[in-house]
Amino acid sequence: MKPRTRILDAAMVVFRRQGFRRSSIEQAAEAAGLTRQALYHHFKSKEALFRAVIERLYENALAAEIASAEAAEKAGGNLADILIAEITARLARLIAPLQGSPHVEELFSEHLAQARDLYQKYAALQAGQLAAAIERACRKQRLVLAAGMSSRDLARCIEMAFHGTKSAYPAMQPADAFLRDLEIMVRTLVAGAVSPSPRKLSARPKPAKQSSRSKTGDRR
């Protein structure tokens, strides 16, 4: 295992156990089996180490989101299924490393104070990923968006639903209830935002016409 990976793994354990404010660079070094000087070679402060931990969480979450979207598409899921799979995978990667920590709310709050730029960067990437998935699904499944709505508009609405649901569940806990309510929101949004394209509707086979003989009966 590379030293940086070992340090980040150890730091995640320390932050989960101690929270951000009560943790120290010495604790992270000890958990990683390194001296404080050795850890300082990689990270100059606790804040820099915390940012690196947060960035890795976001990177893993985005990778999981992309992979889940591809898997749901290959499995033939509808648009709502694909978007829910994406968001669920993203949140699982963000929540799971902090599961069971008594400092979850502090850590989520502190990450906005210490790494707001990272939050904004990955929020934009995640929104772009949702928009791309919407475009692919609409193209493959022959769906059209409501008048005046773009794929980015729908992605933005879904992200707003995420933040709205989060306001009812501090630190997204309990996770099961949070995800259940978020799924309801996403499915409701998608149901109102997309419909089959006219071409898809016109492609349905028309009922076979009855022959003139069958209409009049067999006159013998």
Image (cartoon, rainbow, N blue to C red):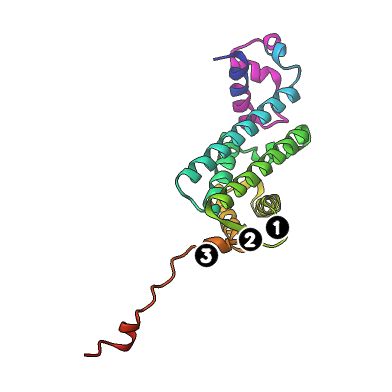
Q: What is the distance, in whole Å, between disc 3 and disc 1 at their CAs?
A: 21 Å
Residue with the mark numbered 3: 201
Q: Amino acid at mark 3?
A: Leu
Is 156 on the left-hand or right-hand side of 89? Answer: right
Residue with the mark numbered 1: 149
Which of the numbered marks, if any, corresponds to residue 193?
2
Q: Amino acid at mark 2?
A: Ala
For residue 100, say whether it is visible: no
User: Where's residue 26, x and y in %?
Assistant: 68, 17
User: Where's residue 12, x and y in %?
Assistant: 61, 27
Q: Amino acid at mark 1?
A: Met
Does the CB distance between marks 1 and 2 fall below 8 Å?
yes
Is 29 inside the magenta-drawn segment?
Answer: yes
Mark 1 Cα within 10 Å, few/some/many (few <14, many 20+)?
A: few
Is 191 inside the magenta-drawn segment?
Answer: no
Task: Name the residue: 65% across, 37% down.
Answer: 103
User: Where's residue 23, x and y in %?
Assistant: 69, 26
